[in-house]
Image: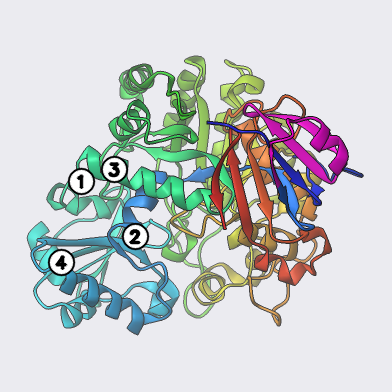
Amino acid sequence: MPTDLVLLSGRVFTGTELHPTATAVALSDGVIVAIGSDDEAQAAVSPDAERVDVAGGLITPGFIDSHVHAVQGGHERLTCDLTDSTDAASTLEMVAAYAAEHPDDEWIIGGGWHMPFFEGGNPRAELLEEAVPGRKIYLVNADHHGAWVSPAALAAAGITKDTPNPADGHIDRDEEGNPWGTLQEGAMDLLEHLLPVPDDAAYVAALEETQRYLRSFGVTGWQDAIVGAYAGMRDTSDAYIEAIESGRLTAHATGALWLTRGFGLDDVDDVVADMVGRRDRIGTRSNTAGGTFRTPTIKIMQDGVPESQTAAMKKPYLDACGHPTSHLGPSHFPPAVLDATTRRLAGEGFQLHIHAIGDRAIAEALHAIQGANEVADIADTRHHIAHLQQVDPADIALMAEIGATANLQALWACSSDQMTELNLPIVGEDRFNAQYPFASMAAAGVPLAMGSDWPVSTPDPWQAIHVAVTRIEPGDTTSAPLGSGEELTLTQAIAAYTSGSARVTHHDGRGVIEIGAPADIAVTDRDPFAVPPLELHTVTNVLTVSDGVVVYRA
């Protein structure tokens, strides 16, 4: 139950700006009751209220993660989690160790391996065979757009040199056409019918682990970017319902229903009716512990990622010699189908959450949102585009004009190994340096929100804020910023991750520190406004409060 609490001797970020004078915030009965000096805050609550000296730390609204894969991330943490591997050898050692601990499992399932650890970004099936002979293995990579599988897994699925590529993906092959061991985009689904299916109890356990993990970083709410069957995961709707009904989910979540690919114009009415039915079945769920869940949003993945040349580009990718190829990358939805579907969805009151990374996919997403605005007010629906890696400068003004929110995954906007080794050679220096134009979008008036895309990358907001402000990878002290001039201010970055994300995820009234607002609070170990920018990644969360309840202490 919420208790009276006073946070003293800190600095206060309101959700939009650093408060000019306040040092304390008082909470009572689950809401914020005072913002001001230490004395003013203490006077607003009972004498027996808990008092916490934050010792100069920053008191912010609880962070809202506007793009996270909550069930998937929690499930990976409970399976063969390769997130913390440091090179190819450690990755294989972790797979072997997990296999040894689970000798009776028919399949070894997990993910989080990092493409830069392997030549060309795509490891061979034989590496898994050498590490764990004879086992069926399916491991999704860190960006979740590809999977690494073992020879036994390929054999079980009947994938050979004669297996055609699916329309929305491809099987990586050697020079003779034999499967290499990695499957991109829709090709991951070739094994879906064989993979073990976790039951709802396993997914509820994954949600509990996610809730615990995110709260340790000061995250009090999120939008799950895929509620549906994807990349070996079955539909998670019932797990959310069970977690809410049983009181095991006490955080605030919204979900984006996954729009499956491969349908045509004649199928639009049926597809939209199915989405409406799924939304209505879930409804608006809540419990007495404060947990909430509903699905006002549709997730549309319009393209893939540059590293596998599946991001949809306006200009071709480059070959090994730096010459243009004929390959532009696929649009997962033909523009005519995308436009027709999004207009119908907007008419049913859905928000659009569109994954678009390549500049052509972004242009297609903007055109779809422009059409959706003609049938529903964006002020209510709050459409957004996630990732926005390769933005055509000519499209930024349109994005501002139509009110589409930029849902930023800021941690990627730096010259990391993956970017320099796998991205730079195939897009060229000019396009490389123009990626993630955060400041340009903000200057044009594009609304900003932030999300982690965890488990693709860490859910720690301070790692992403570090890159948003510096454009340099955390811990890197020698590289130049990616795209000089595209840095956000610290104020802009924190605001995007709090009030900006609260708005776009329909967590209305949250993401701010205001009198009467829900008492969702995060506290840092120091004042980030007094920290050198290149040390922002060292800022840590020490206290998290959700609806007035302390849910994490360092």
Amino acid type of the residue tagged 3 in the rendering: Tyr
Characterize the local packing of mark 1: few (<14), some (14-19) or many (20 or more) Cα atoms within 10 angstroms: few
Q: Which numbered dot is residue 146?
A: 2
Q: Earlier in the sequence, mark 4 or mark 3?
A: 4
Residue type marked 4? His
Which residue is label 3 attached to? Answer: 203
C-alpha span from label 1 to label 2:
20 Å
Tag 4: Cα neighbours inside 10 Å, few (<14), some, or many (≥20)?
A: few
Secondary structure, mark 4, is loop
Please report the bounds of the magenta region as a residue range.
Answer: 23-51
Query: Which callout, 4 or 1, points at the residue further toward the start of the chain?
Result: 4
**CA gap, disc 4 and disc 3:** 19 Å
Labelled disc at residue 198: 1
Q: Are marks 3 and 2 in contact (CB under 8 Å)?
A: no
- Residue beneath the point at 23% across and 40% down: 201
Disc number for residue 129 = none
Could you tell me residue 378's position as x and y percent?
A: 63, 23
